[in-house]
Amino acid sequence: MKDISEQDLKSNIPLASKKENTPKSRVTVGNHVIGGDQFIVIAGPCAVESESQIIEIAKEVKRLGASMLRGGAYKPLTFPYRNDRMFELGEEGLRYLHQAGKEAGLPVVTEVMDGRLVETVARWADMLQIGARNMQNFPLLIEVAKTKKPVLLKRHPGSSLRDWLGAAEYLLYHGNPNVVLCERGIVAPHTHDPTSRFLVDLEVVLAIREYSHLPVVVDPSHATFKRSYVGPVAKAALAIGADGIMVDVHPVPEKAAVDPLQALNYSAFRDLMLSLRKIAEAVGKTL
Ligand code: PEP
Ligand code: MN
């Protein structure tokens, strides 16, 4: 939705909006720059399940060409019940994720849901993820801004670009310039599958370029919620000019503790990377 007025650009999102000569922002995470010539591939499981699981995945996605590792230690699960099939490891998971990133040579991104845990998560992560559900949790955004760590700000499925950039403005205004936006699907009256919940808004990448200098990545996994759609949407994200993707990868996706319908196995991820390489070449990006 084109819902941003001239007045907004001046008064409400002066920091997130683009002036005539504002260069595109580049956000450095570890040894990678998001928003430059490289198309960033952030890969890993939805949830960190064990130390050996995350180390194995980290090494494998690194070998296949990923630039960063993802993995949730604190999960915004829809229902409160946890069991040995669906769980989150909390701080233990953060330590495993950190170790895996170190062993594989990949910077790590993970979600922080609670203002009281920002310091803890920041200790172990290279980039802090604000989940879709918390996009407008302003006290959390302010705490995260204070760390000055790179932030991956996911879009709430019901939010306009105006609201999303408003949330980014909080981070910028509170002193953190290292903001990367992440499109992960919006609510629409129709989807194309009984299990899918959102539609990917690829046009928003173009709208962001029109209004803002902030980099944007697309999460085709949480957006489609459907394994067979993930690769094609990831490729479309690169073709339309996104700065990267964040994709769920799991050795046995059907057995993933969280979100088993959307993760790619290693072989599907390898095929995706091969296609992305060709597209990157065609559009003048590196991988
Ligand atoms: C995730 O990336 O693990 C996640 C929970 O995503 P979202 O906030 O987009 O639902
Ligand atoms: Mn998930």
Image (tube, helix red, strand yellow):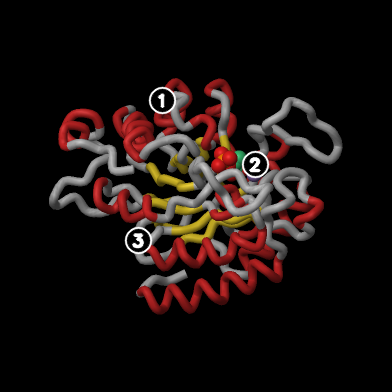
Can you identify the residue that label 2 sits on?
72
- In the rendered structure, which disc, 1 or 3, sits on the residue that comes first in sequence? 3
Report, in whole angstroms, how far the alpha carbon at label 1 lies from the one at label 2: 21 Å
Of residues 125 and 185, which is closer to you in this image?
Answer: 185
Amino acid carrying label 2: it is Gly
Can you identify the residue that label 1 sits on?
142
**Direction from residue 206 to residue 225 in the image, left or right:** right
- Picture coordinates of residue 191 (x, y %)? 57, 49
- The image quadrant that residue 5 belongs to is top left
- Respond yes or no on whether mark 1 lies under 8 Å from ligand 1: no
Extreme-front residue of the structure? 189
- Picture coordinates of residue 197 (x, y %)? 60, 44
Q: What element carries label 3?
A: loop
For the point 52% across and 39% down, which residue is it?
129
**Direction from residue 229 to residue 146 in the image, left or right:** left
Can you identify the residue that label 3 sits on?
36
